[in-house]
Image (cartoon, coloured by chain):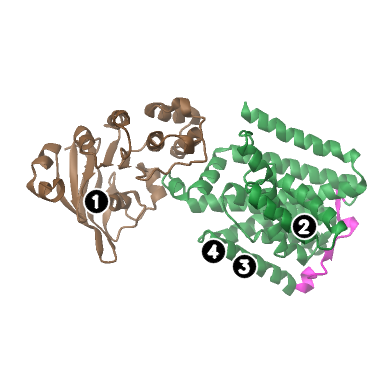
Amino acid sequence: MRDMKAFFLHLAVLAALLAALPLLSAYHVTNVAKIMVLAVYAMGYNIAFGYTGLLSLGHALFFAAGLYAAGMGISQFGLGSAGALVAGPVAGGLIAAAVGLLALRTAGVAFMIVTLMFAQAGYLTVLYFVRYTRGDEGIVLDRAARMLGGVDLSGDTPRYLLAFALFAVALLVNLALVRSPFGRVMIAMRENEARSRMLGYNPYTVKLTALVVSGVYAGAAGAAYAVLFGYVGASLASVQYSILPLLYVLLGGAGTVLGPLLGALLMFYLIDYASSATSAYQFIVGAVLVVLVLFAPKGILGTLRERGLRWLP
Amino acid sequence: MAAVILEARGLTRHFGGLKAVDRVDFDLAAGEIHALIGPNGAGKTTFVSLLSGRIEAGAGRILFEGRDITRLPAHARVRRGIAYTFQITQIYAALSVYDNVALAAQSHGSHPLKPAAMEALDRVGLTDRAGQIAGTLSYGHQRLLEVAMGLALKPRLLILDEPTQGLSQGEIEVFNGIVQSVVPAATVLLIEHNMDVVMELAQRITVLNFGEVLATGTPAEIRANPAVQAAYLGA
């Protein structure tokens, strides 16, 4: 019963996103498409952080892995858009596995620092190999390279629809994952690692699996970003892009399936409106975060779940 | 004597200069309820932590069902059938009672999951609290939930670390019934301070003192042992 309720809520959110397309102006269509891609990234982050308790500060590396696998795949290896969209999540998952094998020997603050260092190393690598990556200036993918089955993905409507399709798959997989037995084990690992070990679960393999899934999401989002928006640059591999999904997840609600979308949506438009009003928009973002931490540390949906919506996954 | 399910030889663990467990030889017969007693600081919890793998042995070896498990990590020993319930209750306070037990049942590979989890709850009398958040249970019920998690693992050996601590007399009687229902299909190793519980449940008792085995025997033998009386019962 509560499973059905949750399932229909998520379908309703997807339906609303689809129904919004003809109602939105071109400006907002582009924005929401970008928000959906960033929400996929944040959902991946949430699988590691919100559900498994892995506070990573290095997810930009996984996002960038997908971004560059797609971008350089297209610009230098003649990959098509479809191939790029497959290469992205594969690259994200592989890099997450490699980082996880080492970083998961640590926990807590040490894990934050180690993941941060890996991501900085990745960022500096992108800058170092400027001949191939074009560094800060970035790679701009031309329209001809961004075709999928004869459809031009740089057009507003196809772009929105592809972002939506990716988001819908990611959301439903996320929902199924956290409802599955493995999802329960991820949450158990977050809640009490010592106890989980004494129930026969190997913390290392559980966390590594969660991190790889998280990396696949981040890589898929990175590849979609490259293909849909046609830009692949070093700034997208910077530490700021490790912090963004954390903020989205904290705002929307860590450990909730819809939290990353809600967080990404609100934060995106908060920055959008604040920066049109004042050049000190980061001050406003900071103030919102302080208020959030003080009054709703579990984020919007986390607080709602605590206040009665217990069925919210 | 019945077949030996677990065998420790020369098991040792020192913390700095403290000999928490020192060259302990120990045999557990399949299907028995075996109590481990001793004064505070005798090394009881350290000893069962060595058996369950929560602490690594300094020396010696452990055989479980004939296989050497000395170097196996704790989670792998659980998979082999050694369940450990914590002295200080370690339930998942934020999860439902059902999810707590389901985590144990699915680790054992129980399929379908729900009946297996509900059966474990039924055995400790918590069926009607399945949907409750575990952290909101009374202390006694949390202890029973901890035991239910142990049962849901369907262990070959169930290690209970001071399970009746803080339980009311009525809850202790329920608990005694649960432990008696576990054997002889499985084996129980019980650390316990409450001598009434020990005398009612245990077929054999091992007394630890300063990390060494002082005596092993039936309850009657242990009661009559002058060394035990001197060291432990304070007589």
Q: CA distance from mark 1 to mark 3?
A: 46 Å
Q: Which mark is residue A284?
A: 2
Mark whose residue sits in front, 3 or 4: 4
Q: Looking at numbered disc 3 in the image, what kind of residue is underneath it?
A: Met
Chain letter behind tag 3:
A
Mark whose residue sits in front, 2 or 4: 2
Callout 2: helix, strand or loop?
helix
**In the image, what residue occupies the spot 51% across and 44% down?**
A188
Tell me the shade of chain A. Answer: green
How packed mark 1 is, by other alpha carbons closer than 10 Å (few <14, some 14-19, many 20 or more), is few
Chain letter behind tag 1:
B
Callout 4: helix, strand or loop?
helix
Q: Which residue is mark 3?
A: A117
Callout 1: helix, strand or loop?
loop
Q: Is residue B2 above or below residue A37?
A: above
Mark whose residue sits in front, 3 or 2: 2
Q: Which mark is residue B40?
A: 1
Residue A169 x %, y %? 72, 41
How many numbered badges does the structure rendering display?
4
Callout 3: helix, strand or loop?
helix
Query: Which mark sits nearer the N-terminus, 2 or 4?
Result: 4
Q: CA distance from mark 4 to mark 1?
A: 36 Å
Residue B216 seen in render:
yes
